[in-house]
Image (tube, rainbow, N blue to C red):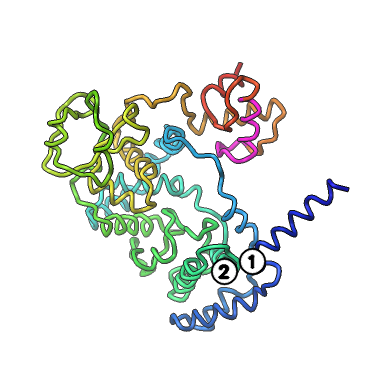
Amino acid sequence: MTRFLAPMLLALAALAATPALAQGDFRSCLSGLRGQAAARGISAQAFDAATRGVEPDLSILDLMNNQPEFKTPIWDYLAALVDDERVQDGRAAMGRWGQALAAAEARFGVDRHAIAGVWGVESNFGKDIGGRPLVQSLSTLSCYGTRRRDYFTGELMATLKIVQDGDMDASALRGSWAGAFGHTQFMPSTFQRLAVDGDGDGRRDIMASVPDAVHSTANFLKKAGWVNGLPWGYEVRLPQGFNAGLAGRKAKRALSSWAAMGVTRIDGRPLQGDYAAGIIIPAGVNGPAFIVTRNFDAVYSYNAAESYGLAIALLGDRLKGLPGIRAAWPTDDPPLSRAQRRELQQLLTSRGYDVGEPDGRIGSKTREAIKDVERRIGLEPRGRPGGKVLEALRG
């Protein structure tokens, strides 16, 4: 009896916690949104056409409310986003779309490799755009979201404006559960402000047109403060006893000031340049360190996370043919590339664990299986896909 009662109690608790789900009327909510849309210049015809037949997708609420508890170490984050596989894919994409990237660079003065870095990190060069209908996702979040409803309502209105303006059909607008879409994952309001026509057809379509996507991304970075000809930064070597309190993206000072403290490039060459820069140490003073300029700030603004900005910058460098990070991360358990993560999942499957399709994405099933392996080999069960677990499974 208890086995059947527990799920029922959990379901009742969920309904009590979100009364909109238990009592709300989605159609009534849409009617209210229709009035808001009219006040923002969206016609009733456009609203009705975009929302006709739309039903709420309540699975989105689980994604919104159940963010993963596992905190990814910076070395794991970068190993998955800037691996040899993505570099190879990026070089192929840059070869195919070289003319569009060169045109975007010339038009906005933004390094094509930085643009490609955003493209690669955001959607794996168009392979992982997301498949959730934006109107459905954003109307669900507008009506039933447990937080930031006004924000998602604004994004829904921006989506409807995209449709009304004729840039894209509602049926083509698919993306993440939160509403990001296209090759470089713009939010709808960002699209409205910064998307541009890159292929000359008079429309802005970052879903189907790579030129539109890369030109729009270049425009974003330009408006965020990108300076043509300025490096984003590079890896440096810190002197013994470096004061970690001086580090920080915003704590910029002249390169000569850093040089006077004994900071050099990672290969020992002196710092050169007449510009201000900060130093970031994403894993502390015992890990890799980087000089970062205002161009790094422009990349940072795309997603407001230093790890994200570093992934884009380093991927862009790799696409240029530059080496990756040279200093060692402060861990004795090396991170895994996506190919190694797929191998890990295949090995888990061969040992009877249900981890789903071996795709290199580490979800809850894979983490639970890893925890079991970690327990067996005497590690703290954290669910981390590291080298020690992989070697144990190989053995």
Residue visible at 37% across and 40% down? 311
Q: Where residue 328 appears, x then y in whole percent? A: 36, 24
Q: Where residue 142 appears, x then y in whole percent? A: 55, 69
Between the C-alphas of marks 2 and 1, the distance is 7 Å
The residue under label 2 is 139
Residue contact between numbered discs 2 and 1, judged by CB atoms under 8 Å? yes
Asked where in the image residue 342 lies, by quadrant, the reply is: top right
Q: Is residue 377 magenta?
A: no
The residue under label 1 is 56
In the depicted structure, whether residue 370 falls above or below residue 141 = above
Dot 2: what SS? helix
Dot 1: what SS? loop
Magenta residues, start to end: 358-374
* Amino acid under disc 2: Ser
Report the front residue among 41 and 94: 41
Report the front residue among 211 and 326: 326
